[in-house]
Amino acid sequence: MKVKIEVIAAPGCKNCAAKQSELRDVAASLFGEDNLIWREVNVLDELDYAVALGVLSMPAIAVNGELRFSSLPTRDHFRAALRALGSR
Amino acid sequence: MHTIGKVARMAGVSADTLRYYETEGLLAPASKTTAGYRLYDNDAVRRLRFVKHAKACGFTLSDIKELLALKRKDSACCEDVRSLVIEKKLLIEGKLEALRAMSRALDGLIHSCEGGRNPTDDCPILGALDVSLREASR
């Protein structure tokens, strides 16, 4: 099963880049590279999409088209949340 | 130095608004006269203009406090301010979308009825709202 994870952020967020990379590694280790669709969404380019997801603060993370995090979680929190989603 | 009345007139707000901003921590007088009257310097006037402009852009007083705090914070950068503005835009766009959805729903109701002098028991709009209400309460 493919899992689509989207990080919605403003361009130029220096704080986000390193953390995003860590979170991507977590998702890849759980689902495998082949099953992971990881997308970084520039909120200014896709404002309507961000609004439709209900994003009110950034960086936010949507999993399979649903907003799941309104800020970047810790790796452990992210792993636990993805596992919980995967077991549904 | 300016009195509260003068500053209020210059900014087009009431003296009560200035006192309220003071209790909210947004704007403090530079000093007080021996009789206890508030006196404002030019910095306070500038700050008041900032508050007015920010309010006109949809920022709440709490947001404005955050913006003013970023302005004073040495470690803050333009990106922090820009993020706040983008988040405000997301909120406003979300509200606009909700309003557009309401407007579309009203269009549907308007088109469901041709008006006229039929009794309200037969009114398709009231009927449609009644059905929605029943569905919502299920």
Image (cartoon, coloured by chain):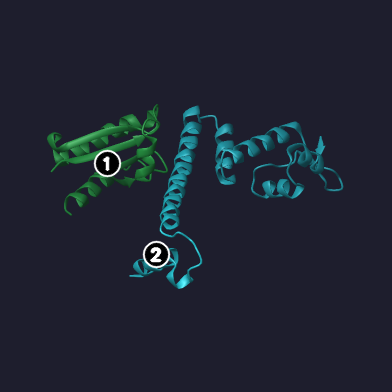
Chain colours: A green, B cyan
The answer to whether B23 is drawn above or below residue B75 in the figure is: below
Neighbour tally class for label 2: few under 14, some 14-19, many 20 plus, Cα within 10 Å: some
Give the amino acid type for the residue marked by disc 2 in the picture.
Answer: Ala
- Asked where in the image residue B33 lies, by quadrant, the reply is top right
Location of residue B102 in the rendering, given as x and y in whole percent from the top left corner: 44, 52
Seen from the viewer's position, the closer of residues B33 and B24 is B24
Mark 1 — on which chain does it sit?
A
Q: In the shown orientation, is residue B3 left or right of residue B94?
A: right
> Where is residue B20 shown, x and y percent of the image?
69, 50
The reply, left or right, for residue B35 in relation to residue B94 is right
Q: Secondary structure at mark 2?
A: helix
Q: Which residue is mark 1?
A: A75
Q: In front: mark 2 or mark 1?
A: 2
| Residue type at tag 1 | Arg
Residue B30, image x, y percentages? 75, 38
Residue identifier under label 2: B128
Is the C terminus of chain A in the top left, top right, bottom left or bottom right quadrant?
Answer: bottom left
Rendered view: B16 above or below A60: below
> Residues under labels 2 and 1: Cα distance?
49 Å
Q: Residue at x 58, y 41 (%)?
A: B64
**Foreground pick, A11 / A75:** A11
* Residue B97 x %, y %: 43, 45
Is B126 located above or below residue B83 in the figure?
below
Q: Is residue A27 visible?
A: yes
